[in-house]
Amino acid sequence: MHPSHDESPASASERRLTIVLAITAAYMVAEIVGGLITGSLALLADSGHLLGDVLGLGMALTAIRFARRPATAGKTYGFYRAEILAALVNGVVLLLVAAWIVFAAWERLTGSAPVEVQALPMLVVAGGGLVVTLVGVAMLRAGAERSLNVRAAFLEVLSDLFGSIGTIVAAVIILATGWTAADAVISALIGLIMVPRAIALLRSVVDVLLESTPRHLDMREIEATMRSVPGVDSVHDVHLWSITSGFDAMSGHVRSNGRRAEDVLHDLRSMLRDRFGIRHVTLQVEGADHADDGACCIMDPRCFVPISVSVPLPARAERSRTGPAR
């Protein structure tokens, strides 16, 4: 089973997530009460956005705590991927909220009856929401750079920051000109701004779930650096993927040119850890006379083959029919 690792980037942000969740939930209740008292649909809609934040932050915290559960015989990496699944759900929620905002704005703009907007209460409450979201963004920003799960929560809070600013601008325009459509126009712009951020998050999540090579690592550079280690003749059957944010793993086969396998393995693991930050490495060192038992995937056209590996002629013919390795 997978051994224990240092505290994950998401786990390091747990206390900040808890604080942001508490203040967001408290202000959500305040916005609901304010919306009901003043009859402001804008405030009730913004409280709906905060409800999305509360759900997202709650899922992020739940995933972090769930990921602490120990590995089992059936789940040898433990529950690290729970954080990625939470980020996936949050990314989808962001897209749904953005679609709802744009749809609601379109309905309001095309509606026959004008909608009354009480701009002054809207401005006051939006100002309080701006303070709350600024605190949340500041607290989650650092963790968002290292964890997809925290980044998902950060993006939800950030979207509400734009929402608060937009609501303030709309309230000022309505107070100054009486043009109530400003509320719908700015809401639609906020919804459109959310879309590319949500798509970028989902792309990162899909990369992890498909076990793609992490974007911050270059497979060919790693392969070339491995071949430069004394005693390494070639490398093959190399795989590089992420278990969760900040936890990269690698496996591969190394053909030595006669140097002791233990020394080659020690130097490779040290290099991969110190230069590329890959701490979970599984390598098989083979002698120069190692017989190919068919266990390696260089014959499979779907496998990545480093440039230093000579592919047998039958495999080359197969690859030419099915396309290049990825």
Image: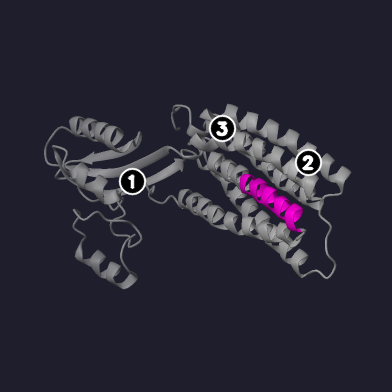
Residue 54 lies in quadrant: top right
The x, y position of residue 106, in whole percent, is: 72, 66
Q: Which residue is mark 1?
A: 217
Tell which tag, 1 or 3, sits nearer the viewer.
3
Q: CA distance from mark 1 to mark 3?
A: 28 Å
Q: CA distance from mark 1 to mark 2?
A: 45 Å
Q: Amino acid at mark 3?
A: Met
Q: Amino acid at mark 1?
A: Leu
**Residue 182 shows up from this direction:** yes
Q: Amino acid at mark 2?
A: Glu
Disc nearer the start of the sequence (2/3): 2
Q: In this rendered view, identify the residue nearer to me: 36 or 121.
A: 121
Q: In this rendered view, identify the residue nearer to me: 287 or 252.
A: 252
Q: Which residue is mark 2?
A: 31
Q: What is the residue that sits farthest to the left in this orientation?
A: 258
- Identify the residue at image location x=48%, y=50%: 204
Q: Which residue range is magenta in the image?
A: 160-177
Q: How busy is the neighbourhood of tag 2: few (under 14 within 10 Å), some, or many (20 plus)?
A: many
Q: State the quadrant of the N terminus.
A: top left
Q: State the quadrant of the C terminus.
A: bottom left
